[in-house]
Amino acid sequence: MIVGTAGHIDHGKTTLVRALTGVDTDRLPEEKARGISIELGYAYLDAPGVDAGGAPPPERIGFIDAPGHERLVHTMLAGATGIDFCLLLVAADDGVMPQTREHLAVCSLLGLTRGAVVISKADRADAARLEQVRADIAALLQGTPLAGAPVFPVSAHSGAGMAALRAFLFDTARAMPRRSASGLAFRLAIDRVFTLAGIGTVAAGTIHTGQIAVGDEITLAPAPSAPALLGRVRSLHAQNRAVTQAQAGQRCAVALAGIGREQVARGQWLVARGSDIATSRLDAELTLWHDEPNALRSGTPVHVHVGAASVMGAVAVLHRLDTAAGGPPASESSLPPGGAALVQLVLREPIAAWHGDRMVLRDNSARRTLAGGRVLDPFAPTRYRRTPQRLAELAAWRQPGAAARLAGLIAAAPFGLSLREWSVAEGLPDGMCPALPGDALRADGGAQGAWALGGPQCAALRDAVIQTLAAFHEREPDTLGPDASRLRRLAAPRLPQALWAASLAAQARIVQTGAFVHLPEHGLRLSANDQRLAQKMAPWMAAAGFEGAWVRDLAKNASESEALLRAAAARLAQCGELHQIVKDLYYAPETIIRLAAILRGLAAACGGEVMAGRFRDETGLGRKRAIQLLEYFDRVGLLRRVGDAHRLRSDTNLFAGPSG
């Protein structure tokens, strides 16, 4: 269990931790000189009679001692997001003070439901004063998640009440359900970075999800540079002892190999490889603190605290969640005190945040805590953020389980859902995904990851394709049909390519001839003259091989008019009997299939990519002809141009067999 102290400055937080653990968490010279906490402090407490070197997790409690000064609430927040239990301190002589209220607001808005109140300096007050402080505390906690929390009057100097508090903390730690270490990728919120001689860079913080072991590959989020910086775990200290493995719910110091001290900062996360994320725009569910005097309006500048990070941003209220049925319509541009809403936060710099992460908003001057909530979608859209479609997606993000969220998002997405993006947003290990709904279509997007399309959307897409083809055949009866890429632009221009190819392959009511798609009942009938010319061209087309045949050469060899042969070749290409690479240059279907097989072989040997030089060497062609062929295969959907390379599409069987 990780315990966080909270409370007004000089109410005895550091003294209490020292009395419990024997550790003075004020380690900086300035803290010693001024007698106040400036940075987060850390200490550990072992159960009586338990060897410190081998204490199991419930028998070792970690403490995060946060500063109480109003100007250091941002530092308190950096540690508060990782705690399991809150100890709110109220000095018997001072009573409830401004930072008592703000720290309580922070803990409540972070969703902390477990905690206790310590009346410190109890030796400075008589019984009547203690009862008055108890009454003030009860009134303060009313309406918060900590209402009814136990209260412990203690004196750190005399030791009065300390035994009862210590026993209560261990009883609570033993009864508290442990955070699950499986199912989610490793994430640690960095709140401290330092260098140790002989060890190197060390990043410390609370592990929020997953587990980590010595030797694991990890990266920083958000990444300080592109591509993501990979490091390796050199050694681990969890709950202040050397271990080979650590897990969610523990304070952990990670010695890093391959990552320099200057590349790491508080506010970043250490995450498992493939789980890094960076966002400057996120959608969230937000509650405005009930004691806030004013409504929160769209456009308000705020400080956003997620994990150990703090960035400036602006809030946009998307949809109120607290409007009573039948009541007056609520303003969708503002949020009243105590109200809840779906909001979008637009940040001035990228942070790492995942679905479910707790967050706190403070005002523009960072002097007052305003609101808190949880992240819903870290990949929030820049446009159409208030449409019914988007609100349906956010309703799916609010579902309580990952499988329910996935099913809801697939049902709400008209153009499919990126499963890779969804799993990263959920914080799932790379490649992990719950089972899809039975009627959903799954498509492998290769390097872009898998996609899913809901059953109703698949049915609507099938109808759209049939209607588009019927209209195309009526409009252009002398053409076999559009190629697959053109058909996509006509029928489903916003559908991802992977889903388009998978849905096209699953269509039982269409026919694909070469690169052309058409309805079964539609076909082109070649005239007797076209058939005659095709027979005369056939030997020359076969002999042309990888070089292809030009219309002028075919006309010369067949002793036919060039204009007549050009028209016949165009009609043969429309029927899929020939393939036109560039104007007047044609290839036989068998040759195209052989070239496609070479491309697949090169892609398999080179990580899915084909470079023009390798293709040129493999085919014996000149560079110009090789590029013309690669551009043709890009155009018809076998390849996709990515920079200087051509990546094989894994979602198509085009030209994969004798039928082409």
Image (cartoon, rainbow, N blue to C red):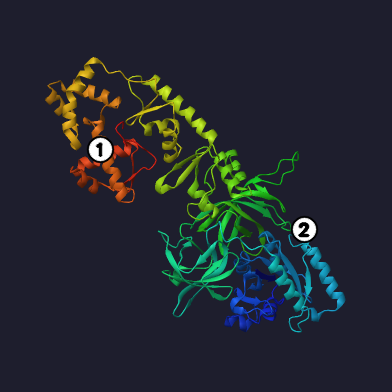
Left-right relation of 187 to 610: right
> Which of the marked residues, 1 or 2, is nearer the chain's N terminus?
2
Residue 17 position, x and y percent, is 67, 77
Residue 468 position, x and y percent, is 44, 26
Residue for badge 1:
594
The alpha-carbon separation of the residues under discs 1 and 2 comes to 74 Å
Judged by depth in the image, the label closer to the viewer, 1 or 2, is: 1
**Residue nearest the observer in this picture, 98 or 251:** 251
Label 1 amino acid? Arg
Looking at the rendered structure, which numbered label has been put on residue 143?
A: 2
Above-or-below relation of 143 to 450: below
Residue 409 visible, this angle: yes
| Rendering quarter of residue 481 | top left
Is the residue marked by circle 2 packed among few (<14), some (14-19), or many (20+) residues within 10 Å? few
Could you tell me which quadrant the N terminus lies in?
bottom right
> In the orientation shown, which residue stands out farthest toward the top?
528
